[in-house]
Amino acid sequence: MTYFSSVEGSLFLITALVAVVSAVMVITQRNPVYSALFLVLTFCALAVLYLLLGAQFIAMVQVIVYAGAIMVLFLFVIMLLNLDRPLETQSKLKHQRLVAGVLAAVLLVEMIYLLHRGLPTTGTQPSPPRNFGTVEEVARVLFRDFVLAFEVTSIVLLIGMIGVIVLAKRHLDEKKAAAPERILSPLRKE
Amino acid sequence: MDWTYWLFLLLKMVIVLGWALLMVPLLIYMERKVLADFQARIGPNRVGPVGILQPIADGIKLLLKEDLLPAKADKYVHFLAPLVAVVPAFLALSVVPFGPITHKETGTGYFVTHVNVGLLFILGLGSLNVYAITLAGWASNNKYSLMGGIRSSAQMISYELSMGLALIPVLMIAGSLDLVRIVENLGVAKGEGLSRLLLTVPLTISFVIYCICGVAETNRAPFDFPEAESELVAGFHTEYSSMRFALFFLSEYVNMITVCALATTLFLGGWKFPFVPETGPFPLLVFLAKVMIGLYGYMWMRATWPRLRYDRLMKLGWTRLLPIALANIILTGILMIAFQ
């Protein structure tokens, strides 16, 4: 129990607890805005866990990308689509609870098995190098060893972006063809 | 890691927090006087000598007012929103370097802490700031508040992007995300002669974009859309009063300080100034003077320019600032390779 009585260990315990509890709250809350907010809390807790592991860059990117950008868009959509009222109707997917339960059980069994077998102790593993997880180290690995994977990923993302623009623009073009005046000046009164 | 280390750290946190809390009433007074000056008025002059106690009177008035909660508002989120505004605002100050490292072996100096990802830390906290306004707008159950909240999230996401891209040339030249190292490296990394002169060009472009985005990020005039009075009553804080409104107010001013401190650190040389020694109180004084000049700029802008129209704001962000910032990164890269 020496690890858990150190500053780092107690921080880990608190953060892990926050992460797990808020993750449970995400799926149990009826109000989608609350769910989204608890998801943000989960992401922030994960960022702190990354920090405890020495991965500073990943921790900050976690906050900026997931908590700061993606979840804001989620909230945006929830508010704009008026989903911000508790959902009364049951979900249309049948057996959803059953499938989710089975999958969760499988994961739980897997985890118990792994924990029972014992995780590799820190003694057998090489300790992480100095500066592990800093921006410089991440960049060195990303742009030297995995540069191909990095570039391919960026191209996939670019294709995704182009796809979105094409889909959105087609919709706009149809509207324009139907009523060109309207689109050009929505405020103009005839 | 003995107890003196923690005591020293705690002391530094208290000093920075106290400084920020003292700066806010000072800035409010300064803003009212500066605006009055621009508009050929006298400004506050009744409470205390030359009205210097006016912000304290305002503060007491705010705290004694009734704390209202609209009937159908979401009380948890309504309570949470001002806190989400204040906490990141103060946290960001913890990595601001007010001066150089004074003890090489322990790495302490004129700052609370310096981390390897200091700049990302501030940007991350800035991105959390969007939540405060969006949630305040949503939780108030008021259409003006909601409009203000949604406008703000669109505005802040758009300008955050350009701001992040505008900072990249600085990182490329300084070669670090650590704010202390950036100040130390930037002057040397630019080289001498022609290289120094030409590398100043992309940095100046970055500075201008950063300033525009900084004003938009803190929702100040001429980009104060979340609370545009003439269109949205008071925007996201229409339904806020008393202490909770005061917290929003506080966070706005602390965010202004952070934006100016970051501008000072990244573009204006931080605690350095020609012919001023880097010992004793001098670095602190130089840094604070530069921050105050930036804050005066904020007030100057507010007094001078009218608010933009919303569609033009978005157009400016996406079709002007973003492409310029992207081109600026490429320009920096070319110049850096040319002068390697």
Image: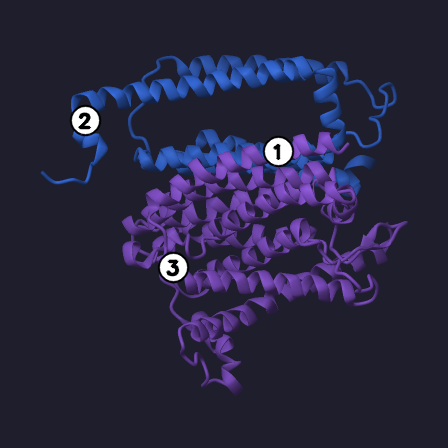
Is A181 positioned to the left or the right of B303 in the image? left
Same-chain check, marks 3 and 1 = yes
Q: For mark 3, name the chain.
A: B
What residue occupies the far left of the structure in this picture?
Answer: A190
Which residue is the site of mark 2? A180
Mark 3 vs mark 1: give the one in front.
1
Instruction: Identify the secondary structure beneath mark 2.
Output: helix
The amino acid type found where label 3 is placed reads Tyr
- Disc 2 crowd rating (10 Å Cα; few below 14, some 14-19, many 20+) is few
Instruction: Identify the secondary structure beneath mark 3.
Output: loop
Q: Please identify the quadrant where the C terminus of chain B is shown.
A: top right
Q: Which mark is residue B331?
A: 1
Q: Position of residue A79 (x, y in %)?
A: 35, 38
Q: For mark 2, name the chain.
A: A
Is B169 positioned to the left or the right of B67 in the image? right
Is residue B151 visible in the rendered structure shown here?
yes
State the blue chain.
Answer: A
Q: For mark 1, name the chain.
A: B
Which residue is the site of mark 3? B240
Sooner in the amino-acid sequence: mark 3 or mark 1: 3
Residue at point 33%, 51% (across, down): B145
